Amino acid sequence: MSDYEFNIRDARLEDLDSIYKIELESFPDPYPRGLLKAFFFLPGSILVAVSRMEIIGYAIGLLREDELGHIISIAVAEKERRRGVGKALLGGLIERLSGSGVKKIVLEVRKSNFEAKSLYQKFGFETKKEIKGYYKDGEAAEVMELTL
């Protein structure tokens, strides 16, 4: 694992196809390609992880009113997971959002996604509430929050 290298950079519109491919393989109810494209034109930050000139993960965070950041999505290509890519993307996104004046960051995560919740907790996120039936399949979401 020590020879595994990747870089985090700002996403570009030409990265959209790679981002969408990772989105499709990562979530049972993926965002439509058009919505992912729309995020490029909203205030916030979209980061990608690149290894061997291939996009292997992405993170999307938007700026909301009242110094609030909202993490929309973080995903890593299935074959690249458990190598620190998600952790690096989350850290980079928190850094970018806080650098934009955000004082609090929120996100929604599937109640059953223990791996993601564990990662968020390591960064200081706390579960604040549950939204029943949040996902298309009826699963609840936990709303997690990080105060900076």
Image: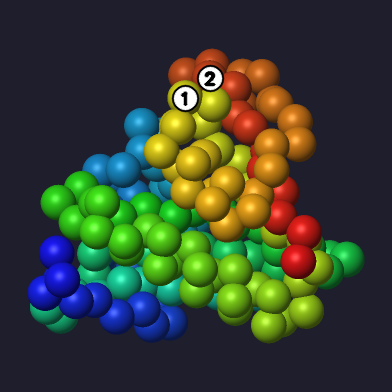
Q: Nearer the viewer, residue 130 or 42?
A: 130
Secondary structure under tag 2 reads: loop
In terms of image quadrants, where is residue 14? bottom left
Taking the spot 69% from the left edge, 26% from the top edge, the residue there is 131
Q: Amino acid at mark 1?
A: Ser
Q: Which residue is mark 1?
A: 112
Q: CA distance from mark 1 to mark 2?
A: 8 Å
43 relative to 58 in the view: left or right: right
| Residue 1, position as x, y percentages in the image | 14, 64
Q: Nearer the viewer, residue 122 or 139?
A: 122
Total label count? 2
Q: Which residue is mark 2?
A: 139
Taking the spot 53% from the left edge, 19% from the top edge, the residue there is 139
Q: Is residue 141 visible?
A: yes
Crowd around label 1: few <14 · some 14–19 · many ≥20 (10 Å): few
Taking the spot 31% from the left edge, 61% from the top edge, the residue there is 84
Secondary structure under tag 1 reads: loop
Counting residues from the start of the chain, the first of labels 1 and 2 encountered is 1
Location of the C terminus by quadrant is bottom right
**Residue projecting furthest to the front:** 2
Checking the image for residue 8, the label placed there is none
28 over 119 or under it: above or below:
above
61 relative to 106 in the view: left or right: left
Q: Amino acid at mark 2?
A: Glu
100 relative to 83 in the view: left or right: right
